[in-house]
């Protein structure tokens, strides 16, 4: 092991926080003084640093008599971090001494500063866009100021200032090169960032003005000049110099291009360094244009007219009745306009008219868009307004086309609209969205029925010679379809699928149909006849499944759920779903099947008409059986402390889904969460209270590991209400509710639930479960800092577990005792208990227990100032929890690391750890996220 570590190359970074790696593993660089020494050595980039300089670096004045010895000791500790196993006082091969000087032996590719200088030198020898690209590559190496976070008393060491100066010189050079090459947009983010770092550097500020102007932002450039002029007067008492005035004059001497366009050369790889964005290739997410698109020339012309008349247009919102072809038109229009938006296209189906919780929230859409724009998931803010701000900041530098389909209302889309810049949103909605007309740059477009000529063109393009040969039948079909594109498309699909069916026969059967869709009024009356054509083309088995699909609790379902609903084999269900899909009655996506709302309403009417109540009830019972059995099977790989009682076999012959392991189970819970919570809410009314509380309890570990604590509490409360007079079920639900309360920091309510649970378990003689309740009470007492009480409850729990032979429960109790001992200052006893607990959890294969033990073991090491062991053990805990997809526990460990760094005077490392923790909690409702934001704000 030592030989491998000695031969693995070391790499270093000083263009930002000082960091070092051995291969892919980051090295702990020790105390702040050790990192300062390393920072100066790195800033010299292999050059010598005298001991006297290091003394001056560590002590601004009056160094202690032992200062030289302290420097030598810190250097020795750094050597051993770089070369583990190096004997004390050995010279080493990385950090070497030459008389009274030290220097690092390092290759160019292993230090970011040397790579930066090499790229800058290459750029200086180049010209045009290749030079700009080399400069951009060099500037991308910077993460902050040189050796950031190591300033002393507000003073930055001159060596670090000089390195920062190299960066700003490179920014000035790349600006000049980009202005000459006509690709300034590509480097504008780097120029902005440098100007923010050096607000009084007139040469930088002048180049910022020129760059803004070259990018078509003359008004912004003039505003920036006014701000610079005011700052110079306020802070230095001077007027702008010649460079700034010349830049200002150039703004006044040149008009914008007549078409308002900006220079776009090089924009495809622009970087937003300030938001730490790594730009990917421009996204191209538009769905394919419809091969049979016809008509709509008046609407397309109106859209072009709106865009030509309003150069600030940011949104076109298309509304119209269901089935009128809004999405088809929006996709076609987007393809027509795409060339005008060279930075790519984004697309999202907002599911605005789906039932229940499946409507896409703005935050969900923004996370997807930011990810597509190159923002790493960990860098995406948790708050909606922060997400929208970052999204608009990125779009401000680009020209992009965004297609938003199936919008519900203005609140759903307003956060997805660009602010400034040249991007455009095309949105569709089944209803007219109020608020669009009053927004600057947003324009509504109403889509009406096809004209008769357009409808004829649609059928002719789809049916070919058959339509041309019988115009009278075509006219009859158009009349019966009410010129509705969806209805016409369904008729055409049906006709093509049955070559022996003539168009007069199609027209005749349409005329004879008398079915109607309830609830959609006269405008949609003819849709029922159209849907019936696709329905009548189905086999009897597919038709039956179509009628049963609306009985599923959600608007989309898996093939397994469809099999349960229909009492079918999985293979048969997949075949029937494929048949429904071929008739456009369901749509596949992401392994699930969705039904259009109009078709769903039609299927409901058919089911009520053709299927008796007993058959429909039996279908619902089967699907409830499927989810109850599957939820039970899915909760077992999550290693619950108290596994649920196994459900009774299904009377309908349904079997639950199987799972390959923890990751498979977590993914299934995530996909089916909305369905499962809906069943918990409805099962009691259907006379299935046991289904309600069992599925609720099966979700517990999933809710805990994904930090959905409020959803956890709400679901368990619903389950508790369904337990009736079942004391065992009541006890389990009370204990689960206590866990939700604990994570929501409602300790008093959690304690009340636990006391209820403990009393019920004791009355029932269930000592294992009683032990878990005792141990949970001990954990609450720990949080309340009542350590002796915590030990008493944990020891009682351990005795109960041992009496039942429950090794895992006894180990959990030992873990609580060890934590209490550590807080009482009995560190040696605590360390021994933690090591024993870890051994037991590893033997049991309990990832959660092992990770928790490692986290507390690391905390105890930090309490006795054993930093190397603490950091290594914390990292092991993080790796374990990430492998288990336990986001909340991962975040807890990162918060502990951040708190440790903060207490030891290292705000940079503390902020890094807290930011990572906040990223872990993105999309959850964990109260910890608010506490982390408070920490970050306090230490900013």
Image (spheres, rainbow, N blue to C red):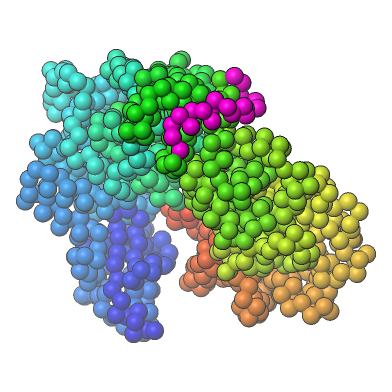
> Could you say where residue 116 lies in the image, as x and y percent from the top left?
20, 55
Q: Is 853 left, or right, of 686 in this rendering? A: left
Residue extending farthest right: 763
Q: Nearer the viewer, residue 908 or 929?
A: 929
Q: Is residue 887 visible?
A: no
> Is 763 on the left-hand or right-hand side of 602?
right
Between 564 and 136, the residue placed more toward the observer is 564
Residue 452 is situated, as x and y percent measured from the top left of the image, at 40, 19
Q: Position of residue 873 (x, y in %)?
A: 52, 71
The range drawn in magenta is: 501-522
**Residue at horizontal 60%, vertical 42%?**
555
Side of 215 relative to 75 (left or right): left
Name the residue located 81 percent from the left edge and 52 percent from the top edge. 688
- Residue at figure coordinates x 23%, y 58% from the top left: 113
Inspect the magenta stretch and tell me whether residue 858 lies in it. no
Picture quarter containing residue 229? Answer: top left
Residue drawn at point x = 80 percent, y = 75 percent: 801
Q: How many marks?
A: 0
Instruction: Say which quadrant the N terminus sits in.
Output: bottom left
Where 129 sits versus 443, above or below?
below
């Amino acid at each position: 092991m030592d030989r491998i570590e000695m031969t693995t190359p070391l790499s270093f970074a000083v263009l930002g926080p000082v960091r070092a790696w051995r291969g892919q593993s980051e090295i702990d660089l020790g105390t702040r003084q050790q990192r300062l020494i390393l920072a100066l050595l790195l800033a010299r980039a292999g050059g010598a640093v005298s001991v006297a300089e290091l003394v001056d670096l560590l002590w601004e004045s009056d160094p202690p008599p032992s200062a030289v010895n302290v420097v030598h000791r810190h250097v020795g500790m750094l050597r051993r971090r770089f070369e583990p196993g190096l004997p004390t006082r050995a010279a080493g091969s990385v950090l070497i001494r030459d008389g009274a000087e030290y220097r690092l032996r390092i290759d160019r590719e292993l230090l970011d500063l040397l790579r930066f200088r090499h790229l800058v030198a290459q750029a200086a020898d180049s010209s045009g866009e290749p030079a700009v690209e080399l400069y951009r590559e060099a500037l991308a190496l910077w993460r902050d100021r040189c050796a950031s976070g190591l300033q002393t008393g507000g003073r930055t060491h001159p060596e670090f200032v000089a390195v920062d100066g190299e960066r700003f010189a490179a920014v000035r050079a790349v600006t000049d090169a980009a202005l000459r090459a006509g690709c300034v947009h590509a480097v504008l983010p780097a120029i902005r960032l440098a100007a923010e770092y050096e607000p009084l550097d007139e040469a930088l500020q002048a180049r910022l003005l020129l760059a803004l102007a070259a990018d078509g932002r003359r008004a912004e450039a003039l505003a920036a000049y006014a701000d610079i002029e005011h700052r110079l007067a306020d802070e230095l008492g001077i007027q702008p110099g010649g460079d700034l005035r010349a830049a200002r004059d150039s703004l006044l001497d040149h008009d914008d291009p007549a078409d308002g366009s900006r220079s776009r050369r090089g924009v495809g790889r622009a970087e937003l360094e300030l938001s730490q964005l790594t730009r990917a290739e421009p996204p191209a997410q538009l769905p394919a244009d419809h091969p049979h698109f016809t008509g709509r020339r008046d609407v397309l012309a109106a859209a072009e007219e709106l865009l030509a008349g309003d150069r600030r247009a940011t949104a076109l919102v298309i509304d119209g009745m269901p089935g009128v072809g809004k999405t088809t038109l929006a996709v076609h229009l987007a393809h027509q306009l795409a060339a005008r938006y060279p930075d790519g296209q984004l697309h999202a189906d907002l599911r605005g008219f789906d039932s229940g919780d499946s409507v896409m929230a703005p935050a969900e859409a923004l996370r997807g868009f930011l990810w597509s724009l190159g923002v790493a998931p960990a860098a995406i803010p948790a708050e909606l307004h922060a997400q929208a701000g970052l999204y608009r900041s990125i779009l401000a530098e680009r020209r992009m086309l965004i297609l938003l389909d199936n919008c519900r209302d203005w609140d759903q889309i307003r956060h997805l609209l660009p602010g400034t810049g040249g991007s455009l949103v095309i949105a569709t909605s089944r209803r007219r969205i109020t608020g669009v007309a009053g927004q600057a740059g947003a324009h509504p477009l109403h889509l009406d029925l096809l004209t008769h000529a357009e409808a004829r063109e649609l059928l002719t393009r789809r049916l070919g010679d058959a339509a041309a040969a019988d115009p009278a039948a075509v006219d009859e079909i158009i009349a019966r379809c009410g010129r509705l594109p969806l209805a016409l498309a369904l008729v055409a699909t049906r006709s093509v699928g049955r070559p022996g069916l003539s168009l007069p026969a199609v027209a005749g059967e349409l005329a004879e149909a008398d079915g109607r869709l309830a609830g959609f009024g006269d405008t949609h009356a003819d849709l029922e006849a159209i849907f019936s054509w696709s329905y009548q083309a189905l086999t009897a088995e597919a038709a039956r499944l179509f009628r049963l699909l609306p009985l599923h609790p959600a608007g989309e379902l898996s093939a397994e759920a469809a099999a349960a609903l229909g009492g079918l084999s999985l293979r048969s269900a997949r075949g029937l779903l494929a048949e429904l899909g071929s008739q456009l009655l369901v749509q596949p996506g992401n392994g699930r099947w969705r039904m259009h709302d109009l078709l769903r309403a039609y299927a409901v009417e058919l089911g009520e008409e053709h299927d008796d109540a007993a058959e429909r009830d039996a279908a619902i019972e089967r699907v409830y059986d499927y989810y109850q059995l599957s939820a039970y099977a899915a909760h077992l790989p999550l290693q619950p402390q108290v596994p649920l009682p196994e459900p009774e076999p299904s009377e309908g012959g349904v079997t639950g889904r199987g799972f390959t392991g923890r990751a498979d189970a977590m993914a299934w819970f995530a996909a089916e969460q909305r369905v499962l919570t809906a069943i918990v809410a409805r099962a009691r009314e259907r006379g299935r209270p046991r289904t309600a509380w069992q599925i609720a309890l099966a979700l517990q570990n999933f809710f805990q590991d994904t930090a959905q604590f409020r959803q956890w509490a709400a679901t368990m409360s619903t389950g508790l209400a369904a337990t009736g007079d079942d004391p065992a079920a009541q006890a389990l639900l009370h204990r689960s509710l206590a866990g939700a309360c604990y994570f929501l920091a409602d300790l008093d309510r959690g304690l009340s639930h636990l006391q209820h649970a403990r009393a019920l378990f004791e009355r029932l003689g269930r000592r294992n479960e009683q032990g878990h309740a005792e141990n949970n009470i001990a954990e609450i007492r720990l949080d309340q800092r009542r350590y002796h009480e915590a030990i008493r409850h944990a020891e009682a729990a351990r005795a109960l577990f041992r009496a039942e032979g429950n090794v895992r429960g006894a180990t959990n109790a030992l873990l609580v005792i060890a934590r209490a001992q550590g807080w009482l200052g009995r560190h040696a006893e605590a360390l021994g208990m933690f090591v024993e607990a870890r051994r037991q959890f590893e033997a049991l294969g309990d990832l959660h227990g092992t990770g928790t033990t490692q986290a507390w073991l690391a905390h105890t090491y930090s309490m006795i100032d054993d930093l190397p062991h603490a950091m290594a053990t914390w990292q092991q805990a993080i790796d374990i929890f990430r492998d288990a997809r336990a986001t909340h526990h991962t975040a807890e460990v990162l918060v502990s690391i951040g708190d440790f760094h903060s207490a030891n005077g290292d705000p940079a490392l503390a902020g890094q750890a807290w930011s990572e923790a906040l990223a872990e909690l993105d999309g959850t409702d964990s109260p910890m996220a608010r506490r982390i934001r408070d920490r970050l704000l306090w230490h900013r």
